[in-house]
Structure formats: C-alpha cells, structure tokens
Amino acid sequence: MAGYQVIFYPEYELESENTDHDPVRKKLRKIGRKHRKKHDRLVEVIKSIQNEETGLARYEEYLKQEIVKPLPHSCSNSKNISLFEFRVPKVSISGVIRVYFCLSKKIKNKLVILDVEYKTITASKTATACERREEYWRIYDKPR
C-alpha cells in the first residue's frame, strides 16, 4: 500500500511554507477562518489519503462514501473523468467545502488540488479548476 502525494496548483508541496503565490491555499485559509470545523475535517481527509500504509484504501472508501466524487461533465473538452472533488461535509444545509482536484497523468498516486470554494445552494464553479488542470498537465506534470 501507499498514499497519495498531495500538492497545490501549480506545484506547491502540501507542507511548503511558501504560500505567497499560492492562490488555492490562500482561498482555503480564508474559508478556514470562517468555517474552522469543516476546514479541520478537510485537512484530516487530505492527510488520511497521504498515509503511506492506508492512503489508497482511504481514497477508495471516500469514493464509496461520496466524500470524493468524480465530476464527469465539468470540463467540456474532456472525454474521460478527469476532475474530482472532495466534499466536506458530504451534505450540509449551511454549506460544504469543495476542493477540486485532478490526478497526475504521468506520476502514479499524485493528486493536484486545483481550486476550492465554499458552496451553499449556488452552482459549482469548476471553470477555474478545469483551466488549471489543463495548464498543470501541459506545463508541470512531469516525472522528476
């Protein structure tokens, strides 16, 4: 078993302290200030899929529980499911943190967080995540 390597778009490691030019973590911190418990739960979910021994199995469990969901029609130019989301909590009247991500095409078990939003009853905003996914695959998705 192994876990996922989780990075923030464009190419920031999860533990990196360099957040000056990190649009996704800035948004996530802003959401976290208003919704601390949901933010903390999201961090637990992300850390659990990074676990070397249980990460891949946890990811599969989250798919079954619909905490992780594929978004099949979110990017119009995509033939395959290539955009996913974490939903924390899965459902809530007061709102849900949605984290949009893709998986690397070239590096096994690498997950790239592309965008985040706090969603209430409004439609999901996946356009930014779709653009970032294409850019990530084109520019950054290379084995080291």
Image: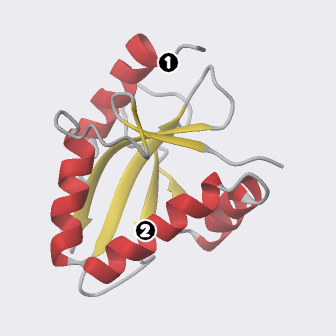
Alpha carbon separation for disc pair 2 and 1: 25 Å
Earlier along the polypeptide chain: callout 2 or callout 1?
A: 2
Task: State which quarter of the image contains the C terminus.
Answer: top right
- The residue furthest front is 17
Instruction: In the displayed orientation, state which residue is furthest to the bottom.
Output: 93
Please name the residue that numbered disc 2 is placed on: 42
Residue 48 quadrant: bottom right
User: Which percent across, then down, holds residue 91?
Assistant: 40, 80
In-image side of 138 versus 132 (left or right): right
- In the displayed structure image, the side of residue 3 where residue 87 appears, left or right: left
Q: Nearer the viewer, residue 49 or 14?
A: 14
As displayed, is residue 32 above or below residue 4? below
Residue at x 19%, y 50% (from the top left corner): 26
Q: Is residue 101 visible?
A: yes
Q: Point out the residue furthest to the right here.
A: 1
Q: Residue at x 34, y 61 (%)?
A: 98
Give the residue displayed 66% in from the left and 37% down from the top. Answer: 109
Q: Where is residue 113 in the image (x, y as percent from the top left)?
A: 40, 43
Which quarter of the figure has residue 80? top right
Residue 88 visible in rendering: no
Q: Is 130 or 13 nearer to us in this picture?
A: 13
- Number of other residues with Cα within 10 Å of mark 1, as a class: few under 14, some 14 to 19, many 20 or more: many
* Residue 81 percent coordinates (x, y): 54, 38
Q: Which amino acid does label 1 sit on?
A: Asp
- Where residue 42 appears, as percent x and y from the top left, is 43, 68
- Up the image or down, 24 lies above or below 90; here it is above
Q: What residue type is labelled 2?
A: Leu
Disc sitting over residue 36 in the figure: none
Q: Mark 1 points at which residue?
A: 141
The secondary element bearing badge 2 is classed as helix
Helix, strand or loop at mark 1: loop
Q: Are marks 2 and 1 in contact (CB under 8 Å)?
A: no
